[in-house]
Image: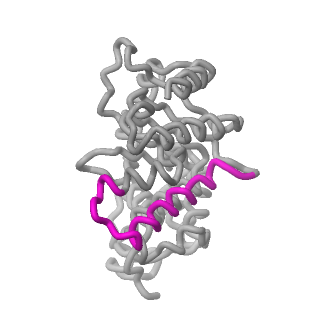
Amino acid sequence: MALRSHPTARQVRLGTELRRLREAAGMTARDTAALLGVNAAQMTHIESGLSGVSAVRLRRLASHYACTDEALVDALVAMATSRTRGWWDAYRGVLPQVFQDLAELEHHATFLREVVVTHVPGLFQTADYARAVYSYVNPGMPASELEPRVEHRMQRRTVIEGDSPTPYEAIVHEFALRIRVSDRRVAHAQLRQILDLTEHNRVGVRIIPVDQDHFAGAGVSMMYVGGPVPKLDTGLRDAPINKGPIDAEAQLQRLRALLVKVEKAALSPTQSRDFIHRLSKEL
């Protein structure tokens, strides 16, 4: 089987979880390769996401590693055997791989929770808002590169719309709503869109007012993505460094604790919608 030249983040995560199971069992890649009848290099390819693994082989590995978490094993098998081609594949070779990885991650999520301080969450953004942000961050970007980015951001919203929306809650700082990335018209339309989207039962927004006491999380911007089992949750931090997916259990626990802190500083959903209505009238 030919090796993948550009494995997706989902494929890499599967390999990472198999490596973790092996290491927890105290086995080497060479030991495991012998079990499957492959060489150590091929086992390394599987654990790095460069090569796939069948459901039969994966279950054999889990049994050999004495993994008794059936829900986890079933979830890993689903990751290994699913052949989902989504709308994001149309952007392969057009946009950087990170765009496809994010869309695929959101597509498979069981729930989404996001904290943003400086910008409206991507899943809430209007096309005009997104275009203003991309244009500012990448001055001089030609339309041939700008518009696919805007279109991709708009397509991402399918995960919270339609007949089976993924539960999504965004905790947004007041600053993000007040900063005008464009003009008054765009700002007003953006607030209106947030209110429209949060009319759905599975989409929520909570606002952190600027005058909230005991909130030291101005540098916190993150997305927490629920997996089919908690061990397969994923965190994403908007930071200058270490922007890759967070999947180590200790780090995920820190993100969960951070979410609890941020939630305590936020208004209730009803108060937040009232807050947005008042802000909209100020424009």
Kindly indicate the quadrant of the structure image that contains residue 194: top right
* The residue stretch that appears in magenta: 135-162
In the image, farthest residue toward the top: 213
Residue visible at 49% across and 72% down in the picture: 91
Position of residue 17 relative to residue 202, above or below, is: below
Residue visible at 44% across and 18% down in the picture: 265
Magenta-span inclusion, residue 123:
no
Q: Position of residue 244 (x, y in %)?
A: 33, 54
Position of residue 269 relative to residue 113, above or below, is: above
204 displayed left or right of 95:
right
Position of residue 19 relative to residue 233, above or below, is: below
Q: Main secondary structure of the magenta part?
A: helix
- Does residue 220 appear in the picture of this structure? yes
- Does residue 15 appear in the picture of this structure? no
Position of residue 271 relative to residue 28, above or below, is: above
101 displayed left or right of 198:
left
Magenta-span inclusion, residue 154:
yes
Viewer-side residue, 68 vs 109:
109
Viewer-side residue, 19 vs 107:
107
In the image, farthest residue toward the right: 163
Q: Position of residue 269 (x, y in %)?
A: 60, 24
Kindly indicate the quadrant of the structure image that contains residue 250: top left
Residue visible at 52% across and 19% down in the picture: 267
Viewer-side residue, 266 vs 60:
266
Viewer-side residue, 89 vs 152:
152
Kindly indicate the quadrant of the structure image that contains residue 23: bottom left
Q: Position of residue 82 (x, y in %)?
A: 61, 69
Q: Position of residue 282 (x, y in %)?
A: 50, 24
Residue visible at 58% across and 18% down in the picture: 271
